[in-house]
Image: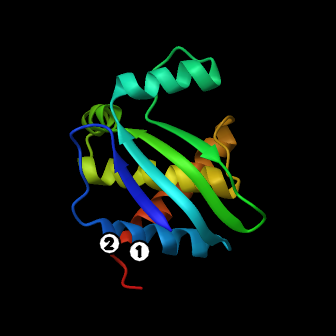
Amino acid sequence: MIEFHFKSEFVIHNKSEYADWINRVIVSEGFVVGQIDYIFCTDDYLLELNQEYLNHDTFTDIITFDYKDGKTLSGDIFISTDRVQENAVKFDVEFLNELRRVMSHGILHLVGFGDKTKEEKLIMREKEEEKIKMFHVEP
């Protein structure tokens, strides 16, 4: 089950479209959907999580907590919509495109993709673009 929670003023109105898309992203990577919770929040909310759980004192756009069991994907994906908005402006892309990039980024982490090295970042970006394109594809 894919659920959306809002700890800021941001709200996704077409939740079923996003849930269907995320489900297809997960299946496309050879996994099945367990419990995926997206929590959309502010920079400050995510900074507190970053400090408490990861000992990082920096802003970030996403933190992913992995609870997968074999091929059943489960996790909590916290997304700062403040940071998504700022990055959309910085990279001159639409907010919803950047949001989908970050949402798919969380799933890609859960299925095993990293982004620490230059090579991993390149692969991650290619996979994000592939998954963003799936948003408008009918199931």
Q: Quadrant of residue 19?
A: bottom left
Amino acid type of the residue tagged 2 in the rendering = Glu
User: Are discs 1 and 2 less than 8 Å apart at CB?
Assistant: yes
Query: Above or below — where is 105 with respect to 47?
Result: below
Residue at (49% x, 17% y) in the render: 58
Residue, x 59% and y 47% (percent of image)? 122
Residue neighbourhood size for the residue with mark 2, other residues' Cα within 10 Å, grouped as few (<14), some (14–19), many (≥20): some
Locate residue 20, reporting x and y percent. 41, 74
Structural distance between the alpha carbons of marks 1 and 2: 5 Å
Q: Which mark is residue 17?
A: 2
Q: Residue at x 63, y 24 (%)?
A: 54
| Residue depicted at x 70% and y 57% | 68
Q: Position of residue 87 (x, y in %)?
A: 33, 35
The amino acid pointed to by label 1 is Asp
- Secondary structure of the residue carrying tag 2 is helix
The front one of 79 and 28 is 79
